[in-house]
Image: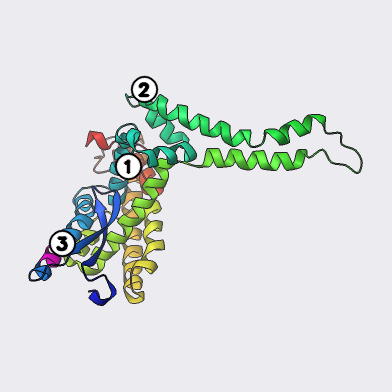
Amino acid sequence: MCSFSKFPQKYVILGQFFIKHTIYCTVYLERKQCEWYNDIHEVIILKEQIYTIPVNEAYDTDCECPLCFLEKKLERETLDYTLGAAMMEPDFRENSNKEGFCNKHFSMLFDMQSKLALSLVLDTHLEEIRKKLDALSKSSKALKSAKGGLFKKTGAAEFTASLSSQLDNISDGCVVCSKINHTMERYADVLLYMWANDEKFKEKFDKSKGLCLKHMKLLTDTAPKSLKDAQAAQFLSSMFDKQKAELTRIQEDIHKFTLKFDYRNKDMEWGTAQDAPIRTLEKISGFIKNDFDQK
C-alpha cells in the first residue's frame, strides 16, 4: 500500500478523499504502539466509503447520466454555500470577488431568497471590477491628449487590446463553475477507480443508461491519466459501445415522438417517448435545468 519509511515516524499518510462530497483533504493517522495496523485498516475503509458513496448513489438513480445527477447536486450545494456559510469564509469571498460568476450562476443566485447576501457579494465583486478597470485609467487619460499622425500612433490599438483583455478576464471567470469543474474531475477519478476495482459497480455501470456527451468526454480525458494503459483501453472500448447503444435507444424515442404527431399514428402508444425532447437535449449537452430540489 505505502512505504512507511517515507513518512515521519509518528504519522502515516493514508490518501486524499472527499468530505461532504466537495472538500478535498489529506488524512493522517497517528501511529500507536500496538494497534496502528487495525486503525489504518478502519480509516482506509472509511476513506473508500467517502469516496464511493455519492457515485454509488448516483448510479442507483434511474437517469440518463449519473454524472449529471452528481453535478446538479453539487451545483445546488455550491450555490447554497455561496450565499450561506461562504459569507463567513474569507478565502472563498476573495475568490468570488476576483472570479465573479457566469451569467447562468448570477441568474440562479438572483432567484434565491437571500437578496442581502447576494448584495454583499455583488458589492465586493464590483469593487474588484473597478480596481481592475482603474489600472487602465492612466492609459485612458493619455488617449485624450494623444495626437496621431502619419508616423505617430495614438496608442488606441494598445489600449483596445488591454481593455478587451481585462473585460474578458472579468466576464470569463466563475467561482461556482471552477468549484464544480474541480470536484467533477475528482468524481471522474473515483468512478474510474471503482470501475477498475469493484465488480458490483462495474455491473451498475453496464446496466446504466450511459452518459451525456459532456461527461463522456470527461471520462474519455480522465481514463488514460487514472487507469493503467490496459485498463484504460478496456474502459474506453466498453464506454464507447455502451454510448452507441444508448444513443440509438434515445433516437428511437425522439423519432417516435415526432411520429406521434402524425394523425395516422394517433392511436400509437407513447411508450417511453413522451419526455424524449428533454432527455435527448440533456443526452447531447448535459443538463439544462437544475431540478435537483424536486427529486
Reply yes or no: does residue 98 show up in magenta.
no
Q: Residue furthest left?
A: 34
Residue 92 shows in the view: yes
Residue that carries the numbered disc 2 in the rendered image = 116
Residue drawn at the location 27% of the way across and 50% of the way down: 66
Q: Amino acid at mark 3?
A: Val
Residue that carries the numbered disc 3 in the rendered image = 43
Quadrant of the image for the N terminus? bottom left
Percent position (x, y) of residue 86?
A: 33, 36
Percent position (x, y) of residue 212?
A: 36, 51
Of pointers 3 and 2, the one earlier in the residue sequence: 3
Q: Nearer the viewer, residue 256 or 268?
A: 256
Q: Nearer the viewer, residue 282 or 167?
A: 167
> For this view, does 185 lie left or right of residue 12?
right
Q: Residue furthest right?
A: 150
What span is colored magenta in the figure? Answer: 39-44
Alpha-carbon span between mark 3 and mark 2: 42 Å
Q: Are marks 3 and 2 in contact (CB under 8 Å)?
A: no
- Assign a secondary structure to mark 2: helix
For the residues carrying marks 3 and 1, which lies nearer the camera in this image? Answer: 3
Residue drawn at the location 27% of the way across and 65% of the way down: 193
Residue that carries the numbered disc 1 in the rendered image = 276
Find residue 14 and name its label.
none
